[in-house]
């Protein structure tokens, strides 16, 4: 039974349990919302959407309405091959209904990593990334020195800062600054899952302070850091880093 588990993988994260998002939000990741044996309900700016599964693109405002049943939420970074393959499924409004085959990847799996592996096999992943951008993103994941990191990394891969930002927006579908914030949230969330305080998690994530972390978490996850910390810490038995 994987109800109530949180898993961090390589540029993806997943949550299995009941919904607890108390405000509309949008984020950098491509999100899969899968009802485990039932439909889910998403609140979008212009409508309510009921479906067995939905793919949500970057920067699409949404909220999953609370319900009594378990769901799978999977957040995939747009810079990995799986993220780019999922991005290709989206309609012009940044939303797509999940196919039966995609949903079955999760309902037939006994773990989130297993579901991700099935999903990777299902989707034809043929979306190459600019090698300069790939190297730049790798360097940015390692660089925690704050201001000026984009310029330093751009020069390291033979681009100007504005040119690197342009390439990133074109290939990722989101701005480089948004991608950096999402990566910071990932680091802070892992820190919270391992028992850090909110202030410690803010430092670990590279945020200016705890208030900055709180603003970004509400904006991109729809939860306060305290609520997110409660979920992460309460599922620490099943917490894994793959």
Image (spheres, rainbow, N blue to C red):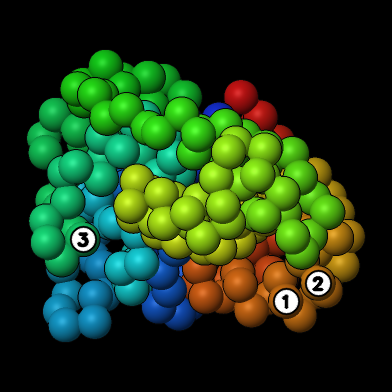
Q: Is residue 207 above or below residue 7?
A: below
- Spot occupied by residue 195 in the image (x, y as percentages of width and height): 84, 50
- Asked whether residue 29 is in view, the answer is no
Residue, disc 1: 212
Residue placed at 77% from the left, 64% from the top?
Answer: 147
- The mark nearer the N terminus, 3 or 1, is 3
C-alpha gap between disc 3 and disc 2: 31 Å
Mark 3 neighbour density, 10 Å: few (under 14) some (14–19) many (20 or more): some
Q: Are marks 3 and 2 in contact (CB under 8 Å)?
A: no
- The mark nearer the N terminus, 3 or 2, is 3
Q: How many marks?
A: 3
Helix, strand or loop at mark 3? loop
Residue, disc 2: 208
Helix, strand or loop at mark 1? helix
* Residue 138 appears left or right of 211: left
Residue placed at 51% from the left, 60% from the top?
Answer: 162
Q: Are marks 3 and 1 in contact (CB under 8 Å)?
A: no
C-alpha gap between disc 3 and disc 1: 27 Å
Q: Is residue 145 above or below residue 147?
A: above
Residue, disc 3: 94
Q: Are marks 1 and 2 in contact (CB under 8 Å)?
A: yes
Helix, strand or loop at mark 2? loop
C-alpha gap between disc 1 and disc 2: 6 Å
Residue placed at 11% from the left, 38% from the top?
Answer: 99
- Spot occupied by residue 69 in the image (x, y as percentages of width and height): 35, 54
Mark 1 neighbour density, 10 Å: few (under 14) some (14–19) many (20 or more): few
């Amino acid at each position: 039974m994987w109800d109530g588990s949180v898993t961090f993988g390589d540029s993806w994260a997943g949550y299995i349990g009941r919904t607890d998002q108390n405000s509309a939000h949008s984020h950098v990741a491509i999100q899969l919302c899968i009802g485990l044996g039932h439909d889910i309900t998403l609140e979008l700016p212009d409508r309510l959407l009921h479906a067995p599964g939905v793919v949500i693109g970057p920067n699409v405002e949404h909220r999953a309405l609370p319900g009594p049943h378990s769901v799978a939420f999977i957040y995939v970074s747009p810079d990995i091959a799986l993220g780019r393959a999922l991005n290709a499924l989206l309609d012009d409004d940044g939303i797509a209904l999940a196919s039966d085959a995609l949903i079955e990847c999760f309902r037939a799996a006994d773990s989130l990593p297993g579901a991700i592996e099935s999903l990777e096999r299902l989707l034809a992943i043929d979306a190459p990334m600019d090698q300069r951008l790939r190297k730049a993103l790798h360097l940015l994941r390692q660089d925690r020195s704050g201001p000026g990191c984009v310029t330093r990394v751009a020069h390291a891969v033979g681009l100007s800062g504005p040119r690197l930002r342009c390439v990133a927006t074109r290939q990722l579908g989101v701005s480089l600054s948004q991608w950096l914030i999402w990566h910071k949230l990932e680091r802070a969330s892992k820190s919270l899952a391992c028992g850090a305080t909110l202030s410690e998690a803010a430092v670990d994530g590279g945020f200016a302070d705890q208030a900055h972390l709180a603003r970004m978490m509400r904006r991109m996850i729809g939860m306060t850091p305290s609520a997110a910390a409660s979920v992460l810490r309460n599922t620490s038995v099943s917490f894994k880093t793959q």
